[in-house]
Image (spheres, rainbow, N blue to C red):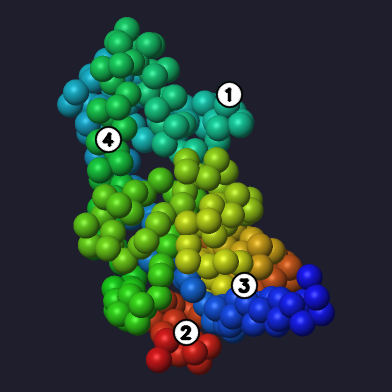
Amino acid sequence: MDISSLLTFGSILSFSSLLIHRQRDPQKFYCITFDLDDTIWRCRPVIERAADTFMQYLHSNYPEIAKLYPTKTEWRTLSAQVAKEYPDKKYDLSLLRKLCLEKVAKEAGLNPIDVVEPAHKAFLDERNQVMDQLFPDALEVLKEIQAQGIQMGAISNGNAVVADISGLRDFFAFAVNPETAGAKKPSMLPFEQALKWSNANAPCEIIHIGDSITSDVQAAQKFGCRTVWIKSGSIWSGTAASLAGDKVNNGRGDVELNSLSELLPVLRRWKVLR
């Protein structure tokens, strides 16, 4: 190859590199991810209602089990015991419930095949009834982000199934939970999976929004995302801002908000939204 050809080849490489460089704006965000429980909706009333429905289902359909575990108190004690028996599975709440159902079915002399899936579905169907517990302006925030063409995803430690929530499913391009990721936040695995499923090429092109200072804010910061701390968590779930204490010294988020309703002005200031 002569010198003129080398120069031409080098020019092509330089031009190609320039085009590749221009494809991604380093200051632009290509995905916004949300935690769900105590970020989009109030967690405690949703969980308590689902637990009540679950116990009612057991009493109506499997009285043999209900006799052994008549209330939520006994069931939660059982759940804690099973979690200790399967420490490598404790991140997966759905699997733990199924393991509990398998155990109690055998104790009650029933076939686990007839019990596990129907009973778990009774809980999960109610677990997904969240629309009446949305935080104020949650829908407005999601609609505005969607209207401006920004991709949204969910990264949750809970077992709500976004695809089965009719009022929310259309907002989220993907949903990561411990079952899909094989771990729960603050592990990096959920964030790694979200990056793979998102339109972003790198963590710095993602904004993560959540209520937990450790599982959401500090974990997402460690991964490389920009973060928003929504201080709406509950005392019950252990994610309230008042419980953060010294944990905030390890990272407080790029922005701290008292409610989701304050998010849109921040996204406009960051030029994510027009």
Along the line of sight, which residue is nearer the eye, 141 or 130? 141
Sequence order check, earlier mark of 1 and 2: 1
**Residue 10 image position (x, y, % from top left):** 74, 78
Kindly indicate the quadrant of the structure image that contains residue 76: top left
Query: Which residue: 38% across, 11% down?
Result: 107
Which residue is the site of mark 2? 272
Kindly indicate the quadrant of the structure image that contains residue 274: bottom left
Query: Which residue: 41% across, 70% down?
Result: 151
Numbered label tally? 4
Sequence order check, earlier mark of 2 and 3: 3
Sequence order check, earlier mark of 3 and 1: 1
Q: Amino acid at mark 3?
A: Cys
Mark 2 Cα shell of 10 Å, populated few (<14), some (14-19), many (≥20): many
Sequence order check, earlier mark of 2 and 4: 4
Observer-side mark, 2 or 4, equals 2
- Outermost left residue: 60
Q: Amino acid at mark 4?
A: Lys
Which residue is the site of mark 3? 204
Q: Which mark is residue 72?
A: none
Q: Report how far apart the C-alphas of labels 4 and 3 lie in the structure.
A: 38 Å
Helix or strand or loop: what does disc 4 sit on? Answer: helix
Query: Which residue: 30% across, 11% down?
Result: 111
Q: Which mark is residue 85?
A: 1
**Residue 136 image position (x, y, % from top left):** 32, 76
